[in-house]
Amino acid sequence: MAEVLEATASDAPAPGSGAAAALALGLGVACASKAARITLKHHPERQALAAADARLGEIRADALRDGDGDAACFAALVAHEPGVAERLVEIGEHLLARTLHARALVAEMEASVAPIMRNDLLAARLLIDSAEAIVRANLAGTAGAQSSSDNCSDAVM
């Protein structure tokens, strides 16, 4: 975790906000998974909760891939590599879809999770909401950069 924080705080163009959004999503779904798994230890019969946890695991893996992809693409965008902005938008749209899916899963889990785990679900919701807000801002910024004559690297360097 320290490595990610230091890399994000560095003067390098990436990782940045896209990777931070992916990490927030990953942490959010990890909190939701914890709530599910601790509940399942005491109530293994809650199969819908187990299924939601499995889907959360897929989202967590996707978030890691998207965070790495965003960091790589943004660094390539700053280096003026062609076609990268489109890939950055694809990654952002994928990450946005994952935030919406994660939010729906957390809402679905709400009634099944043990009351003592409610704060983990609260953390999950807040982290997922943060990830969504960052992704939406990044997508708007990327679209603006594509349609503008300004170069992203001028703002980053």
Image (tube, grey):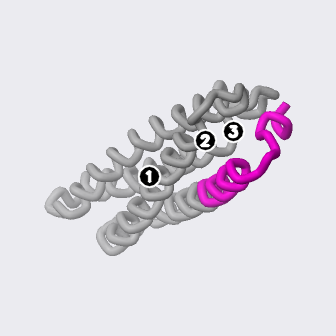
Which quadrant holds the C terminus? top right
- Crowd class of label 3 (few under 14; some 14 to 19; many from 20; radius 10 Å): many
Where residue 110 appears, x then y in whole percent? 37, 71
Residue name at image x 65 percent, y 35 percent: 74
User: How far apart in space, not on screen, are marks 1 and 3 (Cα)?
Assistant: 20 Å
Q: Earlier in the sequence, mark 2 or mark 3?
A: 3
Above or below — where is 39 with respect to 9? below
Which quadrant holds the N terminus? top right
Question: Does 126 sit left or right of 102 as displayed?
Answer: right
Confirm whether residue 114 shows in the render. no
The residue identified by callout 3 is 16
User: How far apart in space, not on screen, are marks 2 and 1 (Cα)?
Assistant: 27 Å
- Crowd class of label 2 (few under 14; some 14 to 19; many from 20; radius 10 Å): many
Viewer-closest of 145 and 116 = 145
Residue name at image x 37 percent, y 51 percent: 33
The quarter of the displayed image where residue 97 is located:
bottom left
Give the label, 2 or 1, closer to the camera.
2
Above or below — where is 8 with respect to 48? above
Above or below — where is 28 with respect to 126? above
Give the label, 1 or 3, closer to the camera.
3
Residue 85 badge: 2
Give the label, 2 or 3, closer to the camera.
2
Name the kind of residue labelled 2 in the image: Ala
Where residue 118 appears, x then y in whole percent? 46, 66
Where residue 35 appears, x then y in whole percent? 39, 56
The kind of secondary structure element at disc 1 is helix
Q: Which segment is the magenta one?
A: 134-157
Confirm whether residue 109 shows in the render. yes
Question: Does 149 sit left or right of 123 as displayed?
Answer: right
